[in-house]
Amino acid sequence: MYLSEQNENSIQHSSITKRLITFAYNTGLIRLGRQFWARSLTVLNYHRIDYLENNPDNFQPNISATPAEFDRQMSYISRWFNVVSLQDVTNWILKNKPLPRYAALITFDDGYLDNYTNAFPVLKKYNFPAVIYLTSGHIESNRPFYWDLVAYCFAHTQKNSILFPDGIERSWDSIDGKNQISKQWIESMKILEENQKQNWISRIPEQLNVVIPDNYFKNLMMNWDQVREMSAANIDFGAHTVTHPILTRISPEQVRTEISDSKKRIEQELNKPVISLAYPNGMKADFNDTVINLAKETGFTTAFTLLNGPTTLNEVKEMPYTIRRSFISHKHSLPQFSTLISPINRLRSS
């Protein structure tokens, strides 16, 4: 899932900072000192690759880039990094097989259809491997992620207020105000226990007096035939749970079920082992020692966070269940993108 509103805002810069970043990008200063991080793994994290105008009713912060911008980013990666596969990373961890200098791994979370229709052709163009972490219960399903359901309800409501879990009713008097409160309501779900969260989500169409059309979300996600096609063409798949709960908000027994059932389902569909996990939401509060130990017991050899990267190769080997990833947003210009996949990103708060 996308980063929180607070983290999303933190990647937006003042106009002066943006000009400085653009200057550093244009002059090559952005890569100054990168040789000291040559033995590192830079993991890019995407969610959706699409145009904002194609998704007026869905949660737009989950759109990482337009297809054209994704192509530009992959072109940049092809110049300055050596793209590796998940198996390459695993071989480094388990067999000490060296990774190339400036290694980069491309990852996607959730399993949206546009990963197949828009990202896959670009990856094939550059002959890049990648990893897509599937929320297995949503593949080939009409069940939306809660953030897309909430976004739809806010987009179609005629009401101008909504009750939050803290008991406070918040209202809006403009489109911008409504969009801001929509994001805040989605964020408020993250701190709830899973049962409470599902209870609030189930009532939001009624709260906002919105009726969801039958099968509206049916074609939002990939189907298993598309997953198999990509799997046969240099794309790996990992587990991202069955239903996308934040793993520290459910019991250890539920964690085990969510990650093991996701793993098993993908393995059944692909007839290949699934060896990697991405934690939903992926921030410090979203995984802990219990979750990590369950990931190990379930048979995963790596697990990925959304803490700011890159990760040194020694860190990858010593802490393979907390590998860092750089979250990419459609709000990033190419100069900002180049900053996020540089060692400077490790200086940002995680």
Image: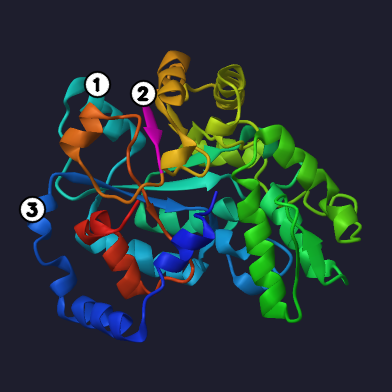
Residue 125 vertical position relative to residue 179 in the rendered view, above or below: above
As for residue 105 lying within the magenta part, the answer is no
- In the image, the segment drawn in magenta is 301-305
Q: Which residue is mark 3?
A: 36
Between discs 1 and 2, the one toward the N terminus:
1
Q: In the image, is 176 to the left or to the right of 82? A: right
Q: CA distance from mark 2 to mark 3?
A: 27 Å
Question: In x, y percent, where is residue 297?
Answer: 44, 14
Amino acid beneath label 3:
Phe
- The 10 Å Cα crowd at callout 1, few under 14, some 14 to 19, many 20 or more, is few
Q: In the image, is 116 to the left or to the right of 179? A: left
Question: In x, y percent, where is residue 48?
Answer: 55, 57
Question: In x, y percent, where is residue 34?
Answer: 12, 59
Q: Nearer the viewer, residue 139 or 126?
A: 139
Question: In x, y percent, where is residue 287?
Answer: 45, 33
Residue 210 vertical position relative to residue 196 in the rendered view, above or below: below
Q: CA distance from mark 1 to mark 2?
A: 9 Å
Q: Which residue is mark 1?
A: 94
Between discs 1 and 3, the one toward the N terminus:
3
Amino acid beneath label 2:
Thr
Q: Which residue is mark 2?
A: 301
Amino acid beneath label 1:
Leu
* Helix, strand or loop at mark 3: helix
Between discs 2 and 3, the one toward the N terminus:
3
Give yes or no for contact between labels 1 and 2 (Cβ–Cβ under 8 Å). yes
